[in-house]
Amino acid sequence: MKIILKIIFKSLRQHMHSSALAVLSIAVSIAMLTAVISLREQTQSNFTRIGHGIDGVLGPKGSPLQIVLNAVYHIEETPGKIKWEYYKKVKQDPIVEIAVPFCSGHSYAGFRVNAIEEEFFSGFEYQPGKIFSFKESDGGAGRVFKENDEAVAGYEAAKALKLKLGSVFNPVCGVNAGDPVHNDVIKITGIMAPTGTPHDRAIYIPLKAFYTLSGHGGEVNAMALDEKYREISGAYIKIRRIRNGIMHPGVQDLKYNVNQSQSAQFVVPNEVLPRLFNIIGWIDSVLFIIAAAIAVMSALFLFSTLLGSINQRKRDIALIRFLGAPRRAVLGMVIGESLMISMAGLLAGLAAGHTVVYAAAIYINCETGVVFSASYVSCNEFFLVPAVISIAFLTSLVPAFNAYKIDIIKGLSHVS
Amino acid sequence: MIIQIENLEKSFSGDCEVIRIKKFELGHNEIISMYGRSGCGKTTLLNILSGVLGGYSGSVKICGTEMKSLGERDLDLFRAKNIGYIFQNLNLLQGYTAYENLELSLQIAGVNYSRDGIMQYLEIAGLFNESGKYPSQLSLGQQQRIAVLRAVMKRPPLILADEPTSSLDSQNSAAVVDLLKKSAAEAGSALITVSHEKDVISAFDKKLNFSDINMSRGAGVLDSIEARPCLASMRKAGDAN
């Protein structure tokens, strides 16, 4: 066995370039498959299953997707406003545990500035059992806002904008470049500990501050004083649980009633996002097909590499046979060579695939605040190992048989 | 006896007889040179003795073992342990250093060895400083000395050398023959060196004209090429074309 391994390593070294190319082609296909699988699964897990603590979003009539992207991921504009009184009505529904109103539409240096009620920081769980923390031990700092000229920043937003306690900024009235800037100077009083959710990428000001910002005009200013005229962009809804984390079944009635009204709609992020991924699901299918095509190509390349290598080494193989190595050893040598190339490709591909996921995770985190992990290992990755071994074995059969049947006398007279 | 041949007959392509040896024996420690015309069957005999060529009739025993009785795997093992072979055309593994060529041969034969032991042999052959070099970095003479070491290092009872100096100049040729004789004698091996070079043949005390043992009419031992059915028919076919 030791001798066979030695001969295999020698052979790989002798055909370093073609072996390296075979490893590379396998690595590329494995990297693509790994990255596609990992990103697809993490995307579905992060965007469709968790909901970041939000059971539903009470929002204006319009595109449900737009509402979810705006309210949960801070990456779209709100399609309109809803009346405060309607929000109050929904909040009073017995199955609603928490309803946190918010106003979006402001920004600072590319990050959203949302106006929100203080309850968001004291009673809202972004994950079961976890509320936003400002403790230094958790990575946060300071405290929640108290006055209209105070704000708290999400961890990623503070990091990107180098915001510290006491830092000041002027919010922009809008989310696009060139939008007007409010004269109001807002001071940072708290940095939220990281949560791994899109909430990390927003800055929050008190809800009432939204109505009193200079430049909003008297009509908006009046909303701060009189609830009758007040409007909000929406509200995060948390539904009561009946037991073991199971949502109260009355949520369907609530949703139906809200959606039947002319005032608002009740959007469940976990229902909307899967629809989005069903629509754009063809992208990862195409990537998967491309990766599979590259895998087939690399198997063919491996086949031709082995075949060429056997033809070149007829004389060496005949000599090794002459020195006493049995035919079975020669067979094992070629199959072993194929397995080694494939396993090297597999390992390199897995490493490269996870590196791609790492790079994508940085980008996704910057864009959405959602945390992807490069070390996430899909169950499907474990299937890659037997799949690669099987392909390597099948690919090597013909070259191995060619080597097996090499005649010693003819082989020794072979001129390569 | 190391070699015992009785009534050996070997033909190619049906009736083209190359070898017919009634009886031939070679004892322990016997060192001989064998000569004869090109195409007379010397290499064929060495191939039969080394077990890589079958399809003959008669009996060929090496160290008392009937070669025909061995299966392929046993024949591989037998050859690895009992026969050292030096090729005419410098069959060294190109991807292996001088040291590795020797080491692999010992490993395949399952012979115990040490690094120092291999280096000692290399020193004897004047190749101590070349141990890490690949065949392409060695001269032809140096390569053939490595081939000699590879054959003798496992101390086989029988060493076969097929035109071991054909690609060497006279100086290197003498060095290789000297190494071959000394190594075989030191290892206690029987040695057959096939050559058509007078200097090489005369370097051995015992000389054997292959035609003295080969009675085949088809072999190249006869003076007239017309008397050799195989070659004559081949020549006629060539003329017709």
Image: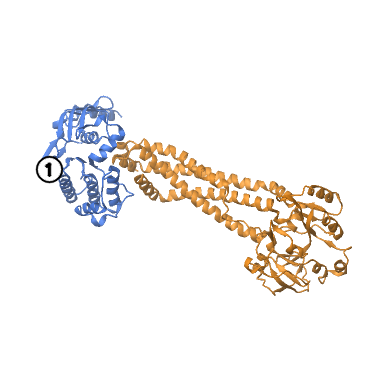
Chain colours: A orange, B blue
**B78 relative position to A163: left or right:** left
Q: Residue shown at 62%/46% (left/top)?
A: A286
The spot of residue A171 in percent (x, y) is 75, 69
Is residue A350 placed above or below A318 in the rendered structure?
below
**A399 relative position to B79: left or right:** right
Of B241 and A89, nearer the camera is A89
Of B86 and A220, nearer the camera is A220
Is residue A314 placed above or below A368 in the rendered structure?
above
The residue under label 1 is which amino acid type?
Phe
The spot of residue B101 in percent (x, y) is 29, 48
Q: Which residue is labeled 1 in the image?
A: B204
**A263 relative position to A375: left or right:** right
Please tell me in which quadrant of the rendered image residue B184 appears: top left
Q: Does the image show residue B223? A: no
Q: Residue shown at 26%/34% (left/top)?
A: B51
Q: Helix or strand or loop: what does disc 1 sit on? A: loop
